[in-house]
Image (spheres, grey):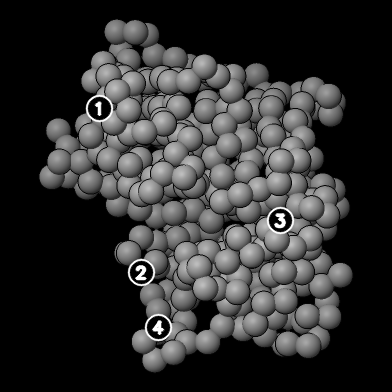
Amino acid sequence: MRFLPLALLLSLPALGLAAAPAEWTVAPAAESLDATALDAAVKAGKYQRVTSVLVAQGGRIVLERYYDEGGARKLRNTRSATKTVAGMLLGLAIEDGKVKGVKEAVLPHLPAMAHHGRDEPRKAAITFEDLATMSGPLECDDWNEWSRGNEERMYLVEDWVDFYWSLPVRGFPAWKKKPADSPYGRAFSYCTAGVTSLGAALSHAVGEPLDRYAARRLFAPLGITRAEWQYLPKGPAQAGGGLSLESRDLLRLGQIHLDGGRWGGQRVLDPAWVEASLQPRARMDDGNEYGYLWWAMTLKAGERTVSTRAMNGAGGNTVQVIPSLGAVVVVTTENWNVRGSAGITMKLLAEGVLPMVGVGK
């Protein structure tokens, strides 16, 4: 996934926002996980260019490893994990009364795109839920190089939002399941352009730039003081990918979903939204499922499997929330152009991390 180089470093103090006092508790060395084998494997290049691995369990950091020069303070571009952050912002916009709910149509929040809805009623009916579950009716598939909506084609034009709404309605040949015949009644199709458009609509709905809304409503309560966004050629922050955060801050985003939307005893997200976001709502061809911009996955270590909810991005970057073990795992990489990078991260988890937190023992 490629993005424009333009990026803005947001500093919450500069915006006049106070960071929350809550901070991570780091387990004493005697209670931390033994990462000797993991360190050796990563440094030997077994998993290519892994840059950090963090684990929180029981609300404490029990493993924190950095394998590059950037260390803990480096902002890490986790690519499409940004999409899950956009889902959190959708929940906040609903809580703030700026969006009526997931069933609300998107186009009223994109006045410049209104003509697309007048020309095609099925576009006028597209909802926030359609975009948040990757199951809208337009022909957009990043995993198909022939798709008109493939994200690589989007990056070639100036107006990324118009790119999405200009796409044709997709068809379903006999060998493809129609939405009505698909699990959950939705035909999944991974579409960065749709989430890009969702972010632009959210910005209009909340009445401020999406990056500032995120800083005020999500990051400040979590004590996240630095965030680097990517931007569309015409200006708005990109909800579809490219947000860079520190590894510990990615861990926070996972932890609040493990804790029902709370951080440091304070509510950050509506617990009902957290629960709704994590529920499977569409199924991929490989059997993995998808909630409101969250992946619902099954990981295996040894003979044991475990259900997780994940923020995933290109290169095998991931934030894995494991409710059954009370754990959150962050893996960041620079395996951008490595073939099978997601599988490499899954192998690292299965061999090097999950056994340490109780899977496969």
Is 239 drawn above or below residue 153 in the view shown?
Answer: above
Q: Depth check: 58 or 211 in front?
A: 211
Residue 295 relative to residue 305: left or right: right
Residue at 35% x, 53% y is 297
How many angstroms separate mark 1 from mark 3 (CA)? Answer: 37 Å
Q: How would you rate the neighbour count of disc 2 (Cα within 10 Å): few for under 14, some for 14-19, many for 20 or more?
A: few
Q: Read off the residue under disc 2.
A: 285
Residue at 44% x, 26% y is 52
- Dot 4: element: loop
- Note whether residue 96 is visible: no
Among numbered discs 1 and 3, the one appearing first in the sequence = 3
Give residue 47's position: percent from left, percent from top: 33, 34
Q: Read off the residue under disc 1.
A: 356
How many angstroms separate mark 2 from mark 3 (CA)? Answer: 26 Å
How many angstroms separate mark 1 from mark 4 (CA)? Answer: 40 Å
Q: What's the residue type where badge 4 is placed?
A: Lys
Q: Read off the residue under disc 4.
A: 177
Among numbered discs 4 and 2, the one appearing first in the sequence = 4
Residue at 28% x, 47% y is 299
Q: How would you rate the neighbour count of disc 1 (Cα within 10 Å): few for under 14, some for 14-19, many for 20 or more?
A: some
Residue at 47% x, 76% y is 186
Q: How would you rate the neighbour count of disc 4 (Cα within 10 Å): few for under 14, some for 14-19, many for 20 or more?
A: some
Is 232 drawn above or below residue 352 in the view shown?
Answer: below
Give residue 13's position: percent from left, percent from top: 80, 22
- Dot 2: element: loop
Q: What's the residue type where badge 3 is placed?
A: Gly
Q: What's the residue type where badge 2 is placed?
A: Asp
Q: What's the residue type where badge 1 is placed?
A: Met
Q: How would you rate the neighbour count of disc 3 (Cα within 10 Å): few for under 14, some for 14-19, many for 20 or more?
A: many
- Dot 3: element: helix
- Is the C-beta separation of discs 1 and 4 under 8 Å? no
Q: What number is the disc on residue 199? A: 3
